[in-house]
Amino acid sequence: MTDVQLSSEPLDISSCIEKATDPTCGGMNVFIGTIRNKTQNRKVIRLEYESYIPMAIKEMHKIADDIFQKWDVKNIVIHHRTGILKTGDTAVVIVVSAPHREAAFEACRYAIDTLKQTVPIWKKEVFEDGEVWVSAHA
């Protein structure tokens, strides 16, 4: 099962975990990316995420397809926020369930690393003393 979403609404971590839960799986890995309060010693006020949604969804499905080819996993959930997020908000949730923990760990790490490299999501970091657009790959 694959569930990928981009949403301007807050992400529901419990729902993501529930969607990936499978009685045949002994391992589930969860990555939760949150907005930190500092970047390079600058206080972060907020982040603003934008995306080319049709392409982003396509790329997120491609990541899931790659994972199913590389590892023995059952379920993959990848949800990412768009819009304005404040410190402490959840920006991304990735859940991978697999019969064994090693596949779940490796696939989850691959998912977040690849998402940051290939999915067209951009963020503006807003600081006390200015702002800057960067790719979400940083």
Image (spheres, grey):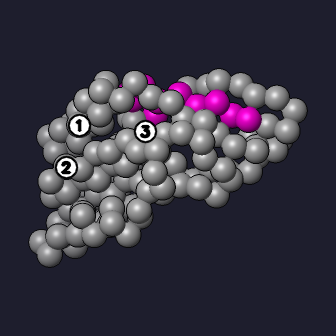
**Rendered position, 36 above or below 61:** below
Above/below status of 118 relative to 25? above
User: Are discs 1 and 3 less than 8 Å apart at CB?
Assistant: no
| Residue 65 place in picture, x, y as percent | 18, 38
Residue at 41 percent across and 45 percent down: it is 7
The amino acid pointed to by label 1 is His
x then y, percent, for residue 2: 19, 49
Q: Which disc is residue 2 wearing?
A: 2
Q: Say which amino acid is labelled 2.
A: Thr
Q: Secondary structure at mark 3?
A: helix
Whether residue 27 appears in this view of the structure is no
Looking at the picture, tell me which residue is in the foreground, 70 or 53: 53
**Who's the residue at 23% across and 33% down the image?**
62
Residue occupied by mark 1: 61
Separation of residues labelled 1 and 2 (CA atoms): 8 Å
In magenta, the rendered stretch is 116-126
Q: Dot 3, crowdedness within 10 Å: few (<14), some or many (≥20)?
A: few
**Horizontal placement of 37 versus 85: left or right?**
right
